[in-house]
Image: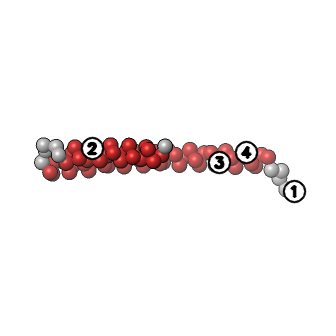
């Protein structure tokens, strides 16, 4: 399933890029659009990674707290 999703996303990205490159705008304007879109996508990816990292840390903290409550303290 992951390979399928990668293929779909790659195809979409390639289609968008080809569309921009064959658009009736000047090269300078097209390059600016590409850079703007890539920056937007990179920010979205970074936000997603940060969100997932925060969830992982939270889950790890919960697991540690759970294990600490089960393991008896040594005297």
Return the mark for residue 61.
Answer: 3
The residue under the point 27% across, 44% down is 15
What is the secondary structure assignment of the residue under circle 3?
Answer: helix
The residue under the point 49% across, 43% down is 1
User: Distance of mark 3 from mark 1, alpha carbons?
Assistant: 24 Å
User: Distance of mark 2 from mark 1, alpha carbons?
Assistant: 65 Å
Density class for disc 2 (Cα within 10 Å; few <14, some 14-19, many ≥20) is few
Between label 2 and label 1, give the one nearer the viewer: 2
Q: Are marks 2 and 1 in contact (CB under 8 Å)?
A: no
Tell me which label, 3 or 4, sits earlier in the chain: 3
- Seen from this angle, which residue lies furthest right? 75
What residue is shown with label 4?
66
What residue is shown with label 2?
16
What residue is shown with label 1?
75
Q: Nearer the viewer, residue 22 or 70?
A: 22
Asked whether residue 1 appears in the rendered view, the answer is: yes
Q: Nearer the viewer, residue 24 or 29?
A: 24
Residue 47 in the image: x percent, y percent? 43, 45
What is the secondary structure assignment of the residue under circle 2?
Answer: helix
User: Distance of mark 3 from mark 2, alpha carbons?
Assistant: 41 Å
The residue under the point 33% across, 45% down is 11
Quadrant for the C terminus, please: bottom right
């Amino acid at each position: 399933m992951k390979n399928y999703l990668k293929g779909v996303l790659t195809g979409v990205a390639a289609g968008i890029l080809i569309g921009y490159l064959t658009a009736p705008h000047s090269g300078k304007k097209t390059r600016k659009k590409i850079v703007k879109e890539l920056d937007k996508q990179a920010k979205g990816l970074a936000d997603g990674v940060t969100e997932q990292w925060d969830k992982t840390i939270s889950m790890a903290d919960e697991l540690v707290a759970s294990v600490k409550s089960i393991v008896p303290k040594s005297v």
